[in-house]
Amino acid sequence: MIKKIVLADDHAIVRQGVRAILENIGTDMKIVAELSNGKELIAYAAKHKDIDIYIVDIAMPLLNGIEAVAHITKNNPQANIIMLSMYDDRVSVEKSLKAGAKGFIVKIAAADELLDAIAEVIEGRFYLSKSVSKYIVQGFLDRSAPRKRGSSGLTHKEREVLQLIAEGHSSKQIAKDLNLSLNTVHVHRNNIMKKLGIHKQAELVRYALKEGIAQL
């Protein structure tokens, strides 16, 4: 049976590389959609319930991969999602798995590692690149570990607004992108600043970059 795969990455060259890997191994996998941002991914997932695997980049515009995955798995906990990342840091791995991803692949990983990840996740297991699997041993999902200031206090919508602020969008544009009133955007912005104890936009941008909510 053909496995339907959705690929979400804002870099065309990465999408081309993944497609080449999958097409070279035979005919049992087919990329049915290529998407370039988290908003497109959420919209597609809402309309298509028969996808076997999602391969999702973490650093995407409008809505990053982690937030997009959290939206998808909230509505479909059984979704099979493998994250792609340029980095193998513990924070990205932890947030990806907590969002509901079942695999985490570093982009520099060998092609066979991506194929192994797909095979494992299809069978209902988890897969991590070798360079990040050490975090399992270190107990990165330990619920008793202290959380970073303010990071767990933001709602999904507030994190969406924060990402768009960090990406340089005006309040008017954010309202349009998220289908909100301008006043609601201002309320979210004020709530974000209050929860994080931040009072300047430049500090909001630095926080968003540090937390992986947005990336340059």
Image (cartoon, rainbow, N blue to C red):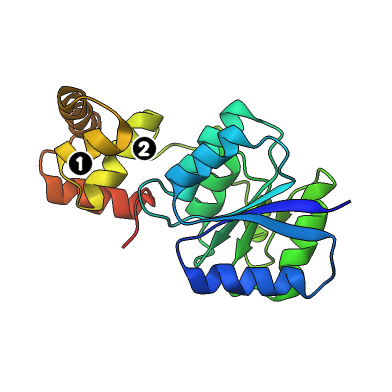
Image quadrant where residue 161 sits? top left
Position of residue 1 in the picture relative to residue 195 (left or right): right
Compared to 77, does 107 lie above or below? below
Q: Could you say where residue 56 lies in the image, as x and y percent from the top left? A: 57, 54
Position of residue 94 in the picture relative to residue 204 (left or right): right
Between residues 144 and 57, which one lies in front from this camera angle?
57
Q: Could you say where residue 84 lies in the image, as x and y percent from the top left? A: 57, 60
Position of residue 71 in the picture relative to residue 32 (left or right): left
Front of the two marks 1 and 2: 1
Packing grade of label 1 (10 A; few <14, some 14-19, many >=20) is some
Between residues 131 and 47, which one lies in front from this camera angle?
47
The residue lying furthest to the right in this view is: 1
Give the residue displayed 23% in from the left and 32% down from the top.
192
Residue to which mark 2 is pinned: 151
Q: Could you say where residue 54 lies in the image, as x and y percent from the top left? A: 65, 50
Compared to 209, does 99 lie above or below? above
- Looking at the picture, which amino acid does disc 1 mark? Gln
Give the residue displayed 77% in from the left and 49% down from the top.
121
Image quadrant where residue 165 sits? top left
Q: CA distance from mark 1 to mark 2?
A: 24 Å
> Could you tell me if residue 211 is visible in this image?
yes
- Looking at the picture, which amino acid does disc 2 mark? Ser
Residue to which mark 1 is pinned: 173
Give the residue displayed 71% in from the left and 34% down from the top.
78
Image quadrant where residue 50 sits? top right
